[in-house]
Image: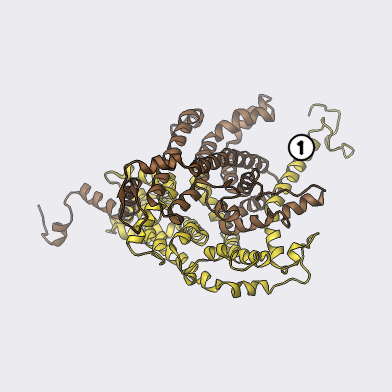
Chain colours: A brown, B yellow
Amino acid sequence: MPVNPGWRTRLLPHTNRARRNLMGYLFIAPFLLGFLLWFLLPTATAIWMAFQDWNMMTPPRFIFLENFASLLRDELFWQSLKVTVIYTLFSVPLTMLLAFAVALLMNTKVRGIHFFRTLYYLPVVVPAVAGSILWAWILNTEFGFLNILLRAVGLPKVRWLVDPNLALFSLILVSLWGLGSTMVIYLAGLQGVPDVYYEAADIDGAGRWHKLRHITIPLMSPVIFFTLVMGIIGSFQVFTAGYLITGGGPDNATLFYVLHIYRTGFKNFHMGEAAALSWVLFVIIVALVAIIFKYIGGSVHYGGRES
Amino acid sequence: MTSSSKPISNPSVWPGDPHNHAARRRWGRFVIWLLLILGASTMILPFLWMASSSLKDQLSVFMYPPQWLPNPPHFENYIDVFVVKPFHLYVRNTLYIVLMNEIAILWAASFCAYGFSRLEFWGRRFWFSVVIGTMMLPSVILIVPTFVLFSRLGWIDTYLPFIVPAFFGGGAFNIFLLTQFFRTLPQELADAARIDGCGELSIYARIVLPLAKPALATVAVFTFLNAWNDFIGPLLYLSTNEKYTVAMGLALFRGALLQTRWDLLMAAAVIMTVPVLILFFFAQRYFIEGVVMTGLKE
């Protein structure tokens, strides 16, 4: 029974619940529109593109699965996949392991923990372009800092970025410079482990290793699991280091998958094939994450509460 | 503890004595401290090398043994950089993108986060899981179709690809972070305001936003960092030299001269890195909080 039949009551819904729904969708409207425009629309475009032979200049031609067939025949596709998998296989676990070790050392209530945390985190904020150029200089064969250090202790020069067998390994080394972000997450996790667990273990006479194995690691497992998943997703998308430090070379030894997409699409203008490559990458990442959830996710310990 | 006959504070006990707990612990602390110093030096040495190289001349960068403190220091490198490439334009362009991103993201992300955290509506849980899903999604897989979309819109070689999308939600990561923070704010204030006849819009603007300053600061520093550091975006969308960002200018600097001038390259790299480092030193708390918040809360 409208008491005041003004414009308000005619425009706005009558019931409280409807009004609440309207309000909610009003507030999340930017996200919903963005999701539609910058996610669903590109996704639909990518599906369409994957089946076209298209260079963006001449009209697209429907070729169905030919893009996928030709990329499977492409040696560079397999090379880029190999490079990215090897990079992930080393970079992610090494980063996690070192970051965990540093976080453990820092969590011993050592003096100047904030100072150390700052120093270890510093490389993370460095722009990828600046960092890449810096490392290209440090790893320079003739005059690079690393080879200067080797020379100082009487070791021969190492062709870090020039040797096809070494270049990818060098970039894995460079990636470790950014372990600070993982370390900060671990450190916060470690500081959240209640002291009572360790005190109880002390009473039981547990040694350092036992405390680490049976208290710290189980309690940290959700955090470790999170960094593993995000690390893999991130390392499959590495681009800038390969593009700037080595240019994908030597001999395609550092041709990362995304660099291959970039060249296929924006240098050779095979837009359809680039879209197909993107889909393959998406499927690989989703499959990997699913496998990790299935086989490792089960051993994650959530401290008794449902998550 | 094990042998009561031995006084704990015996000064003659050597650090490695396995029977003395206090000494052993002190010795352990020292080893830990030493390891941390060693690691931290490895992290910092590249910075020092960058700074040192940036002050050398064309030839002394190649000298062995290297000089850590170049004599004389070539501060003019920092001027020459601007002669080789118009870095003042690059800085201006990048700051413009940064500013527009700050406005767009601080508004859009907090607006959406208010909806997700403070309002009860049909489908809220579903849409929030979509937010988390897009946060996990590998963003590079959409660069090819997004490029096609933006080129159809005529946005190539403009700043629109970096600015307009930010107004639409401001990024899943930021929505997620702010939603988590808004949830921790007391509901009573908003309830009191509602009884006084306050609408949701003014509760958002007058109560929640002022209380959320620390979280907004976290979003602001990450927004600066992402916009300042972005390379793939400018690489794909910008083609006119005068429109380049700092990242683009630095990336193309290497090929700008006939031979690689490592001294100038390092000076340019310092120019790009220093603003980020200054921001980090002043706003460190917000960086760490941002990383920890997304890392620890599922």
Position of residue B229 in the picture relative to residue B202 (left or right): right
Please say whether residue B180 is visible from this viewpoint: no
Residue for point 39% across, 59% down:
B166
**Kind of residue at badge 1:** Arg
Residue for point 15% across, 57% down:
A9
Identify the residue under disc 1: B25
Can you tell which quarter of the image residue B59 is in?
Answer: bottom right
Position of residue A36 in the picture relative to residue B33 (left or right): left
Residue for point 29% across, 59% down:
B198
Tag 1 subunit: B
Viewer-nearest residue: B33 or B169: B169
In percent of width and height, residue B37 lies at 73, 48
In percent of width and height, residue B232 lies at 48, 57
Viewer-nearest residue: B38 or B211: B38
In percent of width and height, residue B211 lies at 43, 57
Vertical order, B251 against B20 (above or below): below
- Under tag 1, what secondary structure? helix
